[in-house]
Amino acid sequence: MATAWLSLGANIGDPAAQLADAIVRLDAHPQIRVVEQSSVIRTRAWGKTDQPDFANMAATVETDLLPIDLLHACLDIERDMGRIRHEVWGPRLIDIDLIAYERLEMDTTKLILPHRFAHERDFVLAPLREISPDTADWISSRHAKDGKR
């Protein structure tokens, strides 16, 4: 089993309930087990700021899925929960991002690990530090080291 870290967020509907539902759905997946989750924090919107504040959290999962398959499982859960992608960084019922997978580094057209913007986003790093400070530090140092992401 591999260990991966996810960032979850929501800012329309009932964000706290949607985050809880996403965790339940992740854990119900036959190839994903949620092993730890952070507390939920409230943050201002990032990127597109004229929208409601977000509820954000992080989760550690164990999985036998490959990274791209884990990403697709997260996207399937978002879709099943009713997420429709209207605009980049816009309001959302649920967002589940794959932040890191073990210490794997990859850069493909479909997936970049560690997540391309995680080191710039306190709403990702603060919850991640709560459950996996070493992973948060690795992500921050990895981006500082290569300077190209």
Image: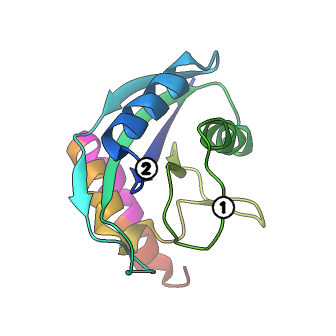
Residue at horizontal 64 percent and vertical 20 percent from the top: 31
Residue at horizontal 31 percent and vertical 40 percent from the top: 16
Q: Is residue 125 left or right of residue 61?
A: left
Residue 7 is tagged as 2
Q: Nearer the viewer, residue 140 or 110?
A: 110
Label 1 sits on a secondary structure element that is: loop
Residue farthest front in this picture: 13
The magenta segment: 131-139
Label 2 sits on a secondary structure element that is: strand
Disc 2: CA contacts within 10 A as few (<14), some (14-19) or many (>=20): many
Q: Is residue 142 magenta?
A: no
Q: Nearer the viewer, residue 88 or 133?
A: 88
Going by the numbered disc 2, the residue's amino acid type is: Ser
Disc 1 marks which residue? 85
Residue 57 in the image, given as x and y percentages of width and height: 32, 46
Residue at horizontal 43 percent and vertical 50 percent from the top: 7
Q: Quadrant of the N terminus?
A: top right
Q: Quadrant of residue 23?
A: top left
Task: Measure the C-alpha gap from mark 1 to mark 2.
Answer: 17 Å
Q: Is residue 65 left or right of residue 81?
A: right
Disc 1: CA contacts within 10 A as few (<14), some (14-19) or many (>=20): few
Q: Examine the rendered structure and indicate whether residue 115 appears above or below residue 76.
A: below
Q: Nearer the viewer, mark 1 or mark 2?
A: 1
Residue farthest bottom in this picture: 148
Q: Quadrant of the C terminus?
A: bottom right
Q: What is the total number of numbered labels drawn onto the structure image?
A: 2
Q: Is residue 135 magenta?
A: yes
Residue 145 in the image, given as x and y percentages of width and height: 43, 77
Residue 2 is tagged as none
